[in-house]
Image: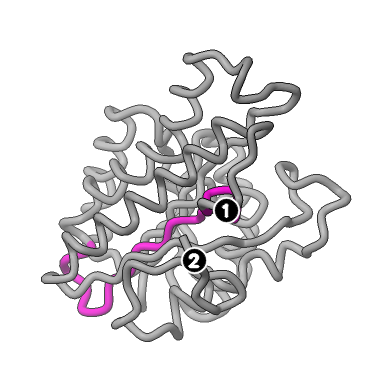
Amino acid sequence: MKTVLITGGNRGIGFETARQLTTRGFHVVIGARSEQHGQKAARELARLGKASLLVLDVIDSKSVASAASEFSSIGQLDVLINNAGIYPDEGISVLTIEREQMVSTFQTNTFGALEMTQAFLPYLKKSPTARVINVSSGYGQLDGLSANVPSYCLSKLALNGVTIMLAEALKEHGIAVNSMCPGWVRTDMGGASASRSVEEGADTAVWLATEADLNLTGKFFRDRKEIGW
């Protein structure tokens, strides 16, 4: 049985990705800040297959290290999906955003994904088909940057850069690293007027975790097709 760890997996796109992978026979490990919310999600998933909770906060190095230590009881990680993210840019622009908010967004959306990959690398190396999937955004594309979504756009642009670097660094270990854009999805973050269902938003992540060629690495995908940085 393959194991997948999904940060922010207790709701939204993360939970739907977890649900689909549970039905495909994965042991799904939910990474969640809240033990209460994480346990609720894990219980729901356990009706479909094997699911566990790993309490972790991607902005806290001690929390990430503790979660990585706890994961040793499982031992092998086949897929890491860095899904946890925040979108805090309502009502501000690149002209008014404060440095502290920039730092806060990068801590979750960029640095968290990098540190998670570093911390769980020993377990990924044990898998013959390891994959890292970074949930990015079209807002992170060079031609998608918006002055009115400054910290989110720049954090996802940097996450795409992290993807390129990790893919290069991990190629010798046979570990595929890719970014994906779920599109505008009806979640707490995307809002009720978004154009895509949560099932559609999760589809490319599920594909990258299961069916995509392992030789595909260092790329950016939407709707299972490569898109430009």
Whether 192 is drawn above or below 55: the answer is below
Q: Residue at x 41, y 47 (%)?
A: 159
| Between 102 and 214, the one nearer to me in the picture | 102
Q: Residue furthest right?
A: 193
Quadrant (top left/top right/bottom left/bottom right) for the N terminus: bottom left
In-image side of 202 versus 219 (left or right): right
Question: Please, what is the three-letter code of the amino acid marked with disc 1?
Answer: Asp
The residue wearing badge 2 is 228
Q: Are marks 1 and 2 in contact (CB under 8 Å)?
A: yes
Instruction: Tell me which numbered mark, 1 or 2, is placed earlier along the sequence.
Output: 1
Q: Amino acid at mark 2?
A: Gly
Circle 2 crowding by C-alpha within 10 Å: few under 14, some 14–19, many from 20:
few
Span of residues in magenta:
124-141
Q: How many marks?
A: 2
- Residue 179 picture location, percent across and down: 44, 61
| Residue 197 screen position, x and y as percent | 78, 64
The span from disc 1 to disc 2 (Cα, nearest Å) is: 9 Å
Please tell me in which quadrant of the rendered image residue 19 appears: bottom right
On the image, the x and y values in percent for residue 137 come to: 57, 53
Q: Secondary structure at mark 2?
A: loop
On the rendered structure, is 4 left or right of 143? Answer: left
Q: Dividing the picture into quarters, in which one does residue 188 lie?
A: top right
Can you identify the residue that label 1 sits on? 143
Q: Residue at x 27, y 60 (%)?
A: 74
Residue 212, image x and y in percent?
Answer: 43, 83
Write the residue at 39% across / 69% down: 219
Q: Residue at x 44, y 74 (%)?
A: 209
> Is 227 placed left or right of 215 in the picture?
right
The numbered mark at residue 77 is none
